[in-house]
Image: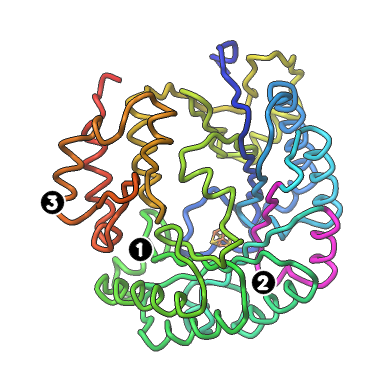
Amino acid sequence: MKDSQITINYPKTLTLYIHIPFCYIKCPYCDFNTYSQIENLFNSYIIALKKEIELWSKPLANSQIQSVFFGGGTPSYLPIKSIKSLMHSIFSSFNLNNDAEITFECNPDDLTARKLNALLENNVNRLSIGIQSFNNKLLKILGRNHSATKAQNAIKRSLISGFTNVNIDLMYGLPTQTINDWIETLDISLNTNPQHISMYCLTLEKGTPMNEWVKSKKLVNPNPDVAAEMYSLAQQKVKLNQFEQYEISNWSKPQNKSTHNINYWRNGYYIGIGPGAHSHLPQKRFWNINSPKKYTNLLTNTQINITNNFLPPVIEKSEHISKELEMAETMILGLRLLEGINVCDFNNRFNINPLTKYNSTISDLVNLNLIYIKNNHIRLTNQGFLLGNEVFSRILENVNQDN
Ligand code: SF4
């Protein structure tokens, strides 16, 4: 790491992301930094993660941790003894808020009563279960291991075991998926009574097998108009079931908005631990090397002296974030939230009123019916939710390339 000796301002509050790069199988649509068949790294990887956690404990000694999010990959794939040892390391290294939200991303197949109890005993208080669909034909296209019935049972078991904050991830806009398939998945989802639902439209990512199948016409290309209809249907259905939409892709019961994700959308600060994990601190962002093997070797074979201005030796790249860019990113991320941008909060953070700073862009977007201003908040209109990228690119145009 070349710029390890630099001045960094560590914020008073932040969130932690812990990356677990293991999956049983690599789903054909997934371009995350995750791998199957590297289970031989389980033990050494946990040792390396604990080392990175320990390294961060000194610079973050005065910071308060609001949430910890174990993502991946498939954190629930970890053996119970590894989960225990990781949680012990986190609790003994950082100052966690008493009510810190601690989320584990899970695959339905992993959620046995034994694993659920182990997660509860180790202070995990939120599950995010990768369901994707309750249609077996679509689960097969997505390359998922679980069946619709197993997924329903996993949610039921999670709730019975005592979890009171369970998210399910669903996908729409899938190849061959019909409106009726989607309605069925939504109905089953609502019947299982989760407290939070995230719904994502499939993105065909470059380099993934699914993208190739669609390009070579082995698989039909999903129709974007049907996907838009699915989104609007979902909005109506979940609203009727007392779910509140609080972000473009997220709905929750009133008390169950995700602290971790809200911090991200408010452009808050966070530290990412593990290969490929990204971090955001005042005026700075950086990310770790992708390879779990290199990450593990570097951390387990290197003698490291910790200082206050320290960045771990696994960081691949870091970059300065100018005030201009941080303001634009705060606007773009914040507009994803239904509450939008709180003008006073923005003013307090950057010492400038966003309505002044983005005066002409905001008037154009208001005239195009993509945003509106109410009660000192700037928000996307319904049309703006569908055309978010248009709004975001206009705001980014304000950032001077030299900044
Ligand atoms: S389980 Fe999740 S992280 Fe793993 S390959 Fe599938 S989509 Fe990607």
Query: Residue 212, labelled with which disc?
Result: 1
Magenta residues (range): 100-122
Q: Is residue 393 left or right of residue 120?
A: left
Q: Is residue 266 left or right of residue 396?
A: right
Quadrant in the rendering for residue 90: top right
Task: Tell which quarter ligand 1 is in.
Answer: bottom right
Of residues 310 and 27, the one nearer the viewer is: 310
Residue at coordinates 59% horizontally, 84% vertically from top-left?
Answer: 191
**Is 11 rendered above or below residue 44?**
above
Does the beta carbon of the residue at mark 1 sit less than 8 Å from ligand 1?
Answer: no
Residue 241 image point, x, y percent:
51, 79
Q: Name which residue type carries label 3.
A: Asn
Quadrant in the rendering for residue 207: bottom left
Quadrant assignment for the C terminus = top left
Instruction: From the image, state whether disc 3 or disc 2 is nearer to you.
Output: 3
Q: Which comes sooner in the sequence, label 3 or label 2?
A: 2
Of residues 305 and 336, the one nearer the viewer is: 336
Q: Which residue is mark 3?
A: 367
Query: Is residue 108 in the magenta section?
Result: yes
Dot 1 lies on which element?
helix
Q: Name which residue type carries label 2.
A: Pro
Residue at coordinates 64% horizontally, 59% vertically from top-left?
Answer: 105
Q: How many marks?
A: 3
Measured Cα–Cα span from mark 1 to mark 3: 40 Å
Q: Name which residue type carries label 1.
A: Glu
Residue at coordinates 38% horizontally, 24% vertically from top-left?
Answer: 351
Measured Cα–Cα span from mark 3 to mark 2: 46 Å
Q: Which residue is mark 2?
A: 108
Of residues 300 and 326, the one nearer the viewer is: 326
Residue 323 image point, x, y percent:
37, 23
Q: Is residue 26 left or right of residue 324?
A: right
